[in-house]
Amino acid sequence: MLEQNKIGVQNASTAGHIAMHEACRALEASQREVDKLYARWQELEARREA
């Protein structure tokens, strides 16, 4: 999903500012999801090591 949204931003760069804005918002949302997953992973790793 994140990679698809990165490609979407690249494609939107020539499609106008509205398309670019929407693509950037989608990319930001995907990045937040990835960040949440990594944070959860770190939490679980810390519990396993404790």
Image: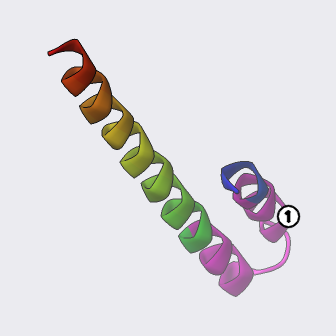
What colouring style does the render use? Answer: rainbow
- Magenta part of the protein: which range? 5-24
Element on which disc 1 rests: helix
Residue 9 highlighted magenta (yes or no) = yes
Assign the magenta stretch its main secondary structure.
helix
Closer to the camera in the image, 38 or 49: 49
Q: Position of residue 20 (x, y in %)?
A: 69, 74
Residue underneath mark 1: 11
Q: Residues within 10 Å of mark 1 (few under 14, many from 20)?
A: some
In the image: residue 30, left or right of residue 4: left
Q: Quadrant of residue 15?
A: bottom right
Mark 1: amino acid: Asn
Instruction: Tell me the quadrant of the picture where the N terminus can be found.
Output: bottom right
* Coordinates of residue 41 in the picture (x, y in percent): 38, 34
Task: Tell me: 32 left or right of 14.
Answer: left
Give above or below for 46 relative to 20.
Answer: above
* Residue 33 percent location from the top left of the image: 47, 57
